[in-house]
Image: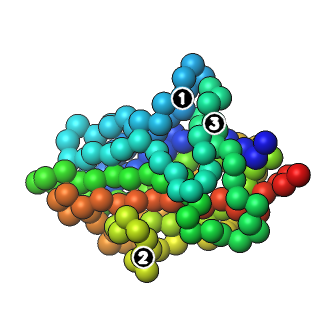
Amino acid sequence: MKNIFLLLVVAFLPVLGFGQSNLVRWSGSTSSVNLNPTIVAANGVSSAAISTGSSPSVSGEHYEGFTFNNWSNSTTLVSSQYIQFRITATAGYKIDLSQFIFRQKIDQGARKYQVRYSKSTAFAGEESVLLSEVTSSNNWVTRTLNFPSGVTLNATETLYIRIYGYDPENIY
């Protein structure tokens, strides 16, 4: 089984004139599989459930985070194989994003991954790298990824973030 466990107490943090605050969070549960976000901000933001590309698929396991299996056997990034998060600034609001934070560990899954973001749902030449290739850890690791200055969502704009996993630990 090719799994990568992701405890996605994923938080988007905006830059505000007087500080930072969480906007949205996806948290796994040991009692059920729920990919829906919790909107933390009082106003100005909407989001959607975690989605995937052609692979991986969401495991039915109840876990402290989210379990994804059926990762690609490719040793390089495949653009159609990802886990996706999205956040939208609602009408009348503007969000200056500063960080994307998640916890991750591996158990016989994708050994390497990259994180990219785009305002284009197709990621068609309009994507940026938030985290270059890193090797997954067998222990829990918290990744705090800083957006470059100027990553702003104007009213009704959506930002998509994808985690691309590849180079599986055990392909047999």
- Label 3–label 2 contact, CB within 8 A: no
Residue at the extreme top of the image, as rendered: 31
| Mark 3 or mark 2: whose residue is earlier in sequence | 3
Local crowd at mark 3 within 10 Å, few (<14), some, or many (≥20)? some
Determine the CA span between mark 3 and mark 2.
Answer: 28 Å
Find disc 3 in the rendering and name its residue: 59
Q: Nearer the viewer, residue 45 or 141?
A: 45
Q: Which residue is mark 2?
A: 124
| Mark linked to residue 112 | none
**The residue tagged with tag 1: helix, strand or loop?**
loop
Give the number of marks: 3
Please say if the residues under marks 3 and 1 sit with CB atoms less than 8 Å apart. yes
Q: Position of residue 92 (x, y in %)?
A: 11, 54
The amino acid type of the residue labelled 1 equals: Val
| Picture quarter with the N terminus | top right
Disc 1 crowd, CA 10 A, few/some/many (<14, 14-19, 20+): some
Placement of 167 over or under 65, stated as above or below: below
Q: Residue at x 35, y 60 (%)?
A: 159
Indicate the quadrant where residue 127 lies: bottom left
Q: Can you see residue 103?
A: no
Q: Residue 136 location, x and y as percent?
A: 73, 55
If you read the primary sequence from the N terminus, does the residue marked by circle 3 or circle 1 appear first?
1
Colouring style: rainbow
Of labels 2 and 1, earlier in sequence is 1
Determine whether 116 is above or below 39 in the image. below
- Taking the spot 59% from the left edge, 60% from the top edge, the residue there is 81
**Quadrant of the rendered image containing residue 76:** bottom right
| Residue 117 locus on image (x, y percent) | 45, 66
Q: Residue at x 41, y 42 (%)?
A: 49
Residue position for label 1? 33
Is label 2 in a helix, a strand or a loop? loop
Left/right placement of residue 151 relative to residue 108 reads: left
